[in-house]
Image (spheres, rainbow, N blue to C red):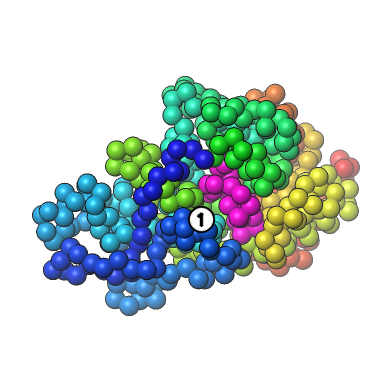
Amino acid sequence: MADTLNQNTTIVVSNKKRSSGSDECDHQDDSFFVSKKQSKSLVWEDPAAALANARHEFGEHGGVNMSIEASATFTVMEPETMRRMFAGELGPDRDFFIYSRHFNPTVLNLGRLMAALEGTEAAYCTASGMSAIASVMLQLCSSGGHVVASQTLYGGTHALLTHFLPRACNITTSFVDVRDLEMVKEAIVEGRTNVLYFESVSNPTLTVANIPELSRIAHEKGVTVVVDNTFAPMVLSPVKLGADVVVHSISKYISGAADIIAGAVCGPASLVNSMMDLHQGSLMLLGPTMNPKVAFELAERLPHLGLRMKEHCKRALEYASRMTKLGLKVIYPGLEDHPDHALIKSMANKDYGYGGILCVDMETEERANRLMNVLQNFTQFGFMAVSLGYYETLMSCSGSSTSSELNNEEKELAGISPGLVRMSIGYNGSLEQKWSQLDKALSKMQEKMPF
């Protein structure tokens, strides 16, 4: 593990509010961040059960929903308290807050829920998924640092690692095929490599990472494992499988409504504390602050994430199976002929399926665009739009959209065909109603251009 993860500081968030006449309060036993000693004794729970068992934050006046703490700054009752807060003697563990770019109570509560979802000691939320990824990398790597990363990543992440971090921070990345464990092992340089970074299920090719083996290889060389689990919340639990840190674009499945941009970092309490450090914390100093009103919205959506994911995954599997029978080249980890089917089956949490994304390889961009046009404008199956996790199906040709940051050689190495159509399968309408729309579009396509 990187040095950043070896700090001893632990934050504990109390249920008890400070009284109006004093800046002192008692510690509470129920905590947001648990100690390393406690964490070893915790038994892993199903993600939905873990969310249900997380502390429920009531509103200030007894409301069943938590209150929104919209303040940018926070008062103290005694002058000496402010000095002690800036000295690190008092903090959120005793309900002391300085400024909402540091810790905010409402955002902190969402972080508690995200930590429960991913089974980590701690979590904190940010203004976007990319800010979460960038902040983690900048906290774990210094100038001259080295990252080993999957060659198949979201285009924005690939651009961050390929262009921005080398130029601005002198942090370089070696890209590897994460299916080739020997290649990963050779790329990691003990004493130089800081992070092994990959997506649990890759965007857009749906390659499934062998999280236990990749984590073992990294840990043998003292390297921190960071996993983007945006494509598979509830389905996979990377920390349970050996990873150290999980990042999310909460904008996707966790939001579920395509109306919010947000991110999260889930991991050891020492890492999250270090990222909020007043002097050297990447979250504190770069300031990708989540609005507490957004945090409130997201906290209200997490309780039904499990139900939504099950329906996304159920329909994705059904459509993938039916399209395969029609002769289309379908990529979906839930299909038995997918090269990683046995792997994801061995790692997945029970009853959540194999993910809500499927891909159809139409071979050329022209054919891909024609299919999407028919699906949206003739049969109303879904929308041509980037992103995922919406209740309607979203479709995009990855090579010319969300993976356009990669050059042609990089796309070929990543296995991104020019005609690869990524579909985030929604759950609006009945399954058979939507299949009828999809089937009608495929029939229309086949009239002029057989598969």
Q: Position of residue 80 (x, y in %)?
A: 12, 53
Left or right of 342: which side holds 301?
left
Image point (65%, 58%), residue name: 235
Seen from this angle, which residue lies furthest front? Answer: 37
Left or right of 248: which side holds 104?
left
Image point (43%, 40%), residue name: 4
**Three-letter amino acid code at the position of disc 1:** Thr
The reply to whether residue 347 is visible in this rendering is yes
Q: Position of residue 170 (x, y in %)?
A: 46, 22
The relative height of residue 367 versus residue 26 in the rendered view (above or below) is: above
Residues rendered magenta in the picture: 225-248
Tell which of 54 and 251 is nearer to you.
Answer: 54
Image point (47%, 68%), residue name: 54
The relative height of residue 417 versus residue 431 in the rendered view (above or below) is: above
Q: Provide the residue designation for mark 1.
A: 120
Element under disc 1 = loop
Q: Position of residue 415 (x, y in %)?
A: 74, 34
